DNA sequence: TCTCGAGGCGCG
DNA sequence: AAAGCGCGCCTCGAGA
């Protein structure tokens, strides 16, 4: 009964045999004792070996779930639990809850990873306590057995047996589980009806034209713009040309942003805004997008766990997290199925209520409509103002209506406002803040630190602006990162529940999409209600797992629909 | 010719 | 209605 199954790349100088190269090496552990020698696994045999071992529910240990798991999934092998070294490494690097072991210190002394780089393509630093140095160029991104074993031990040793340590351990487990879910969702994909999408494009843009040419309805609008602006050669895709043409027509715009154009009164504004809308649709989610991303009736994006500093997922390719509402009608359940779409209602202010132990805000958060609750307690029932004030407090708004409403919010919910203000002050001073489970905000960059040593009035203004900007980041970080943890726990609990149901013989369907605080399941029609119940139970379990017993509700809105467009 | 930043806008 | 946070993708155009 192996407790851990460590998966690594088999590195050898031996020439490939007739059977092919050994692609992987497996080391099983009973508790902390190796259960026999490492096991070489040849190309193509790995999924079967994994599936066999999975009967014992080991925790798999691997450098990168994103590297290994898609191959296993493609062969039908599902993993229950994993410890993802790459993801844990990123968390430990920034976490104030991690012990300052040589391993953690070595991580912290490496230069920050380039922002936005693909998580599994980052060069994984190899740390050896014996040599006390980092190897910048690993032989293989999937890791050798020696390095995987060493780093696993290093990572476990970096988590103390304290309350912050136990929370950190939960975070590492949840992040790793997220890697499994992300790979599974990516493999499942959102059921996508290309015909519906094409019909939508045709009605908006007109019939498909050759690549590199303007769709008919955009061409018509472009002609109209040229006439209205008296600019026969205008290319409306060029901001510079467009701005010049607007100025020539006496329109005093400083940019071509939608919101600025909307303020202006001129016959050209309406067709121009229409052109920009269509242009966006055509270029980002047009015919080419369907060609590139819809295969076998599914949209299969790549989710990037750990791709956002706050712990949210990012995505790569297809703009999976930015699917516009206008084309969501193309996300359609297959025959005999429905989409069960659930979203956590006003997640971030509810999280703030817990973080700040703000009893008043917790009162407001009891029930479905938190903003109405805030309005009733502090804004004379004015929901719109309550919402603007709350969002402004979490984002750091200083101007406009949102800024003006902040004092009113602070009077009613002093603890909640004090918490985000304190996070802002910490960030402005160059400090770091943390999520509830211990995901730390990144250190300020070297440029930022340099900016704070201003030697002139002008530089001082820039320094202050940079400080305020970082304050807004850390202010939001505490809320967004903890919300991401709640969502991760929600997904983890839901996955466990779905797998348990499956083990008992009921296939409730697949998780097919995740969007920060929203999850979509593709479910056999007859099980829709049961799936909805599991989603709600998972939300309650997530809050309990994360926070224990707290007086804040985390309601989820659930829609059972055939088309994603009908989800809200 | 290619790369890369800015501007803009889609999502939460 | 936009503003304050976090992202990814597209186009243009400047510069190597």
Image (cartoon, coloured by chain):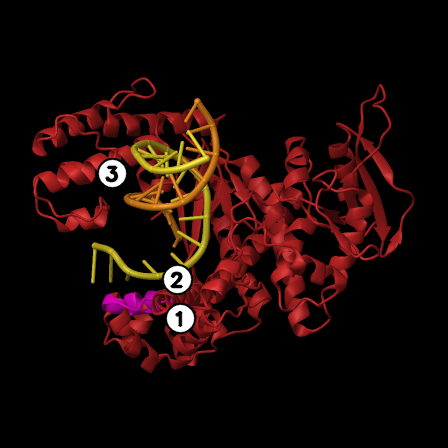
Chain colours: A red, B orange, C yellow
Q: As displayed, is residue A191 above or below residue A453?
A: above
Mark 2 element type? loop
- The residue that appears at 85% across and 30% down in the rendered structure is A13
- The residue that appears at 80% across and 26% down in the rendered structure is A21
Which labelled disc corresponds to residue A365? 1
Q: In the depicted view, which residue is nearer to us: A527 or A346? A: A346
Residue tagged by mark 3? Answer: A239
- The residue that appears at 59% across and 48% down in the rendered structure is A498
Q: State which quadrant residue A164 falls in.
A: bottom right
Q: Residue furthest right?
A: A36
* Of the image marks 2 and 3, the number of the one nearer the N terminus: 3
Residue A486 on the magenta span: no
- The residue that appears at 85% across and 24% down in the rendered structure is A15
Q: Which residues are magenta?
A: A385-402
**Magenta span main SS:** helix
Q: Are marks 2 and 1 in contact (CB under 8 Å)?
A: yes
Q: In the depicted view, which residue is nearer to us: A208 or A308? A: A308
């Amino acid at each position: 009964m192996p407790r851990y199954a460590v998966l690594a790349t088999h590195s050898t100088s031996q020439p490939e045999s007739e059977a092919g190269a050994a692609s992987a090496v497996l080391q099983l552990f009973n508790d902390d004792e190796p259960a026999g020698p490492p096991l070489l696994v040849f190309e193509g045999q790995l999924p079967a070996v994994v599936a066999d071992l999975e009967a014992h529910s080991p925790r798999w240990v691997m450098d990168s779930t994103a590297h290994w798991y898609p191959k296993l999934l493609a062969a039908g092998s599902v993993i229950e639990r994993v410890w993802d070294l790459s993801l844990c490494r990123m968390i430990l690097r920034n976490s104030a809850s991690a012990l300052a072991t040589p391993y953690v210190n070595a991580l912290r002394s490496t230069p920050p990873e380039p922002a936005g780089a693909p998580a599994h393509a980052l060069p994984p630093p190899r740390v050896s306590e014996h040599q006390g140095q980092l190897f910048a160029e690993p032989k293989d991104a999937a890791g050798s057995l020696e390095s995987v074993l060493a780093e696993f031990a290093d990572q476990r040793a970096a988590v103390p047996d304290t309350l912050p340590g136990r929370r950190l351990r939960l975070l590492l487990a949840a992040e790793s589980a997220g890697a499994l879910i992300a790979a599974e969702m990516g493999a499942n994909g959102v059921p996508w009806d290309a015909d519906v999408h094409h019909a939508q494009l045709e009605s908006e843009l007109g019939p498909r034209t050759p690549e590199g040419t303007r769709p008919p309805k955009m061409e018509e609008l472009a002609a109209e713009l040229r006439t209205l602006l008296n600019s026969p050669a205008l290319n409306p895709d060029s901001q510079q040309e467009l701005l010049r043409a607007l100025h020539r027509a006496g329109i005093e715009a400083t940019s071509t942003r939608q919101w600025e154009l909307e303020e202006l009164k001129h016959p050209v504004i309406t067709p121009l805004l229409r052109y920009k809308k269509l242009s966006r649709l055509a270029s980002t989610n047009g015919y080419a997008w369907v060609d590139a991303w819809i295969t076998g009736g599914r949209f299969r994006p790549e989710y990037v766990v750990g791709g956002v500093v706050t712990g949210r997922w990012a995505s790569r390719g297809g703009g999976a997290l930015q699917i516009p509402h206008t084309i969501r009608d193309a996300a359609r359940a297959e025959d005999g199925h429905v989409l069960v779409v659930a979203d956590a209602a006003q997640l971030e202010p509810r999280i703030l209520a817990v973080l700040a132990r703000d009893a008043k805000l917790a009162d407001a958060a009891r029930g479905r409509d938190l903003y109405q609750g805030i309005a009733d307690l502090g804004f004379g029932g004015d929901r719109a103002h309550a919402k603007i004030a709350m969002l402004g407090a979490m984002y750091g708004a200083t101007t406009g209506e949102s800024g003006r409403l902040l004092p009113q919010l602070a009077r009613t919910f002093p603890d909640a406002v004090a918490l985000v203000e304190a996070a802002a002050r910490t960030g402005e001073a160059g400090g770091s803040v943390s999520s509830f489970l211990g995901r730390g905000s990144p250190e300020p960059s070297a440029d930022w630190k340099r900016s704070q040593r201003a030697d002139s009035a002008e530089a001082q203004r820039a320094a202050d602006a940079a400080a305020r900007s970082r304050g807004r980041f850390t202010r939001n970080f505490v809320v967004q990162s903890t919300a991401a943890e709640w969502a991760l726990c929600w997904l983890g609990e839901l996955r466990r529940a779905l797998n348990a149901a499956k083990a008992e013989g009921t296939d409730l369907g697949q998780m097919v999409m995740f969007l920060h605080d929203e999850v979509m399941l593709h479910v056999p029609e007859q099980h829709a209600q049961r799936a909805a119940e599991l989603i709600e139970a998972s939300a309650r379990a997530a809050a309990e797992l994360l926070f224990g017993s707290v007086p804040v509700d985390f309601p989820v809105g659930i829609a059972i629909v055939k088309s994603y467009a009908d989800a809200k």
